[in-house]
Image (spheres, rainbow, N blue to C red):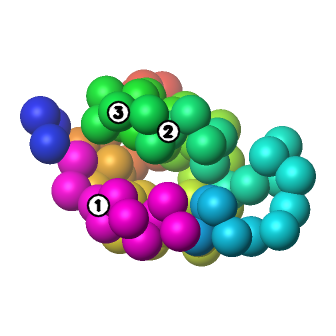
Amino acid sequence: MGNLEYDREGIHDRLEHTGVPDEDLPLDPYALEAPEEFFAVATECFFERPDHLEAVFPEVYRQLKAFYRGPDALHA
């Protein structure tokens, strides 16, 4: 995938200004430390909570789905 395209500032704003505890955020705030960390954290969410990721960050979900060829790709 090389580059996961996402609106870093938009996602940062959405994570920073939710007013909910970190454990209830749609993605771990650590995802914003570096592009590599965003990819790792988003990938974890993609496999553990795909419906949640799709609802909150549909653009990221679509890119990861294309990269992994669907949430069942590892089980094929």
Check disc 3: other Cα within 10 Å, few if <14, some if 14-19, many if 20+.
few
Magenta stretch encompasses residue 9:
yes
Residue 61: assigned label:
none
Is disc 1 placed on a helix, strand or loop? loop
Closer to viewer: mark 1 or mark 3: 3
Q: Position of residue 9 (x, y in %)?
A: 38, 65
Q: Position of residue 32 (x, y in %)?
A: 46, 42
Which residue is under mark 2? 31
Q: Residue at x 34, y 52 (%)?
A: 65
Check disc 2: other Cα within 10 Å, few if <14, some if 14-19, many if 20+.
some
Judged left or right of residue 67, residue 52 is right
Judged left or right of residue 21, residue 50 is left
Is disc 3 placed on a helix, strand or loop? loop
Is disc 2 placed on a helix, strand or loop? helix
Query: Mark 3: which amino acid?
Result: Ala
Quarter containing the C terminus: top left
Query: Mark 1: which amino acid?
Result: Tyr
Q: Position of residue 22 (x, y in %)?
A: 80, 46
Which residue is under mark 3? 34
How far is the residue under mark 3 from the one under mark 2? 7 Å
Q: Earlier in the sequence, mark 1 or mark 3?
A: 1
Q: Residue at x 61, y 43 (%)?
A: 29
Which residue is under mark 1? 6
Give whichever of 12, 39 is nearer the camera: 12
Give whichever of 29, 40 is nearer the camera: 29
How far is the residue under mark 2 from the one under mark 1? 12 Å
How far is the residue under mark 1 from the one under mark 3? 12 Å
* Residues rendered magenta in the picture: 4-13
Magenta stretch encompasses residue 37:
no
